Image (cartoon, helix red, strand yellow):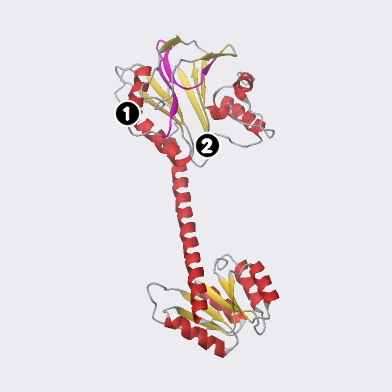
Amino acid sequence: MSKIYLGVVNPKYPAKILVVDDNETNVEIITHILLGQGFEVAVAYDGEYALELTEALDLDLILLDILLPGLSGLEVAKLILAKEKTKNIPILFLSALNETRDIVIGLETGAVDYITKPFQEAEILARIRTHIKIKRLEQERINLLNSIQKDLELARSNQQNLVSFQFPPSPEFKIYSSYKPMDLIGGDLITYDVLPSGDLDILFGDVTGHGIAAAMISLMAIITFKTMDKTFLSPNECLLWIHNTLSPMITTHFISAIYFRYRAEEKLLSFSMAGHHPMFLIRDFQIKRIGTKGFCLMMFPQLMTENRDLVLESGDRLFLFSDGMFEVPNQNEIYMGDQKFAEIVESHTKLNGPAFLEAIQKDVLTYSGGKIADDMTMLVLEIL
């Protein structure tokens, strides 16, 4: 036996409630109270029909009697809470005062509350409104998290806006990059530009922090790099330009950066650094650290950097990497450090291209047990 009562819905409480009780008097009392407050009410007098209505209707709350013919209220609750579609519907048990043990079992099953018989109108309404509000706030939270997750997935799919993986082809050199973020999106950046002279400029950077905020700052740095006129600026002057452009807007993050310009015809590398650790020059399978002094971008009002030139040779490789490659702990919380990382790199100097980067990343992840402590970013320039 079953009924559905449809009342005029009060915009403040447009909720659908299922009342499940085999006692018609109880049902009439509860239904009268709920309809009077503008709720939509569905009624079932047994557990089997209650399950059908739960599947068919988009319910906000269920008032469920513990003692029912056939399936008990406890069994009905277990079935409802076990299904993906209905597991988040709050269930309030209707119970007699002597059913304390069943109430405890019901709450352990997943029901959110109980109402004792005989009913008090104020108590019923207060409990119902509280749990409907909780349910809707939880749904808003879930919707927000889903929306954020979709945005993060979209941002991750567009990660090439922060890290370049394709570089201009040249008979004089090859460039490869690798990127593994700590979060869905990260703050490391690699971007390039080909100047009218044919020189290749590359900006390699690491923003402090992780996630969306760091990614946004990376994007701002890339936009600044792409839009600035580099024609008459040296690498350290380009870093100064980025610093002066971003400093008024960014006060919570820094960027450690490497800026280099490569003139392929002369094999001339000009470079400057802002608070970044040294690059590796790999020559004859040996590693040499090269770098310049300087503080991170946006760390202090004045940026002090210097410029250096280096003539490369055929067979040389210039290897750039973020600190996420060596600031990684193992299971004993012992950090790898730059010396151990250098040994890993040196052990793979006979490899070239993507195989070189993949082997290094694999060894680092083996050391850390697969855990990523920071964004892991690498770039190698191979001189032909």
Nearer the observer, 224 or 333: 333
Q: Position of residue 277 (x, y in %)?
A: 51, 21
Q: Which residue is mark 2?
A: 181
Mark 2 falls on what kind of element? loop
Q: Decide: few, some or many residues near mark 2? Use Cα within 10 Å; few <14, some 14-19, many ≥20.
A: many
Look at the image and say whether residue 271 sits in the magenta stretch: yes
Q: How many marks?
A: 2
The first of marks 2 and 1 along the sequence is 2
User: Label 2 to label 1, Cα distance in Å?
Assistant: 26 Å
Left or right: 304, with 208 as reference point: left
Can you say whether 31 is above or below 169 in the image?
below
Whether residue 4 is visible here, answered yes or no, is no
Q: Residues within 10 Å of mark 1 (few under 14, many from 20)?
A: some
- Judged from the image, the secondary structure of the residue bearing numbered disc 1 is helix
> Does 300 appear in magenta?
no
Q: Residue at x 46, y 35 (%)?
A: 187
Q: Type of residue at label 1? A: Thr
**Quadrant of res 214:** top left
In-front residue for pair 12/349: 12
The residue stretch that appears in magenta? 252-281
Q: Which residue is mark 1?
A: 245
x and y percentages locating residue 292 in the rendered image: 46, 15
Q: Residue at x 47, y 65 (%)?
A: 136
Q: x and y percent of residue 260 in the render?
A: 42, 19
Of badges 2 and 1, nearer the viewer stands: 1
Image point 42% across, 11% down: which residue?
308
Quarter of the image where one finds residue 237: top left
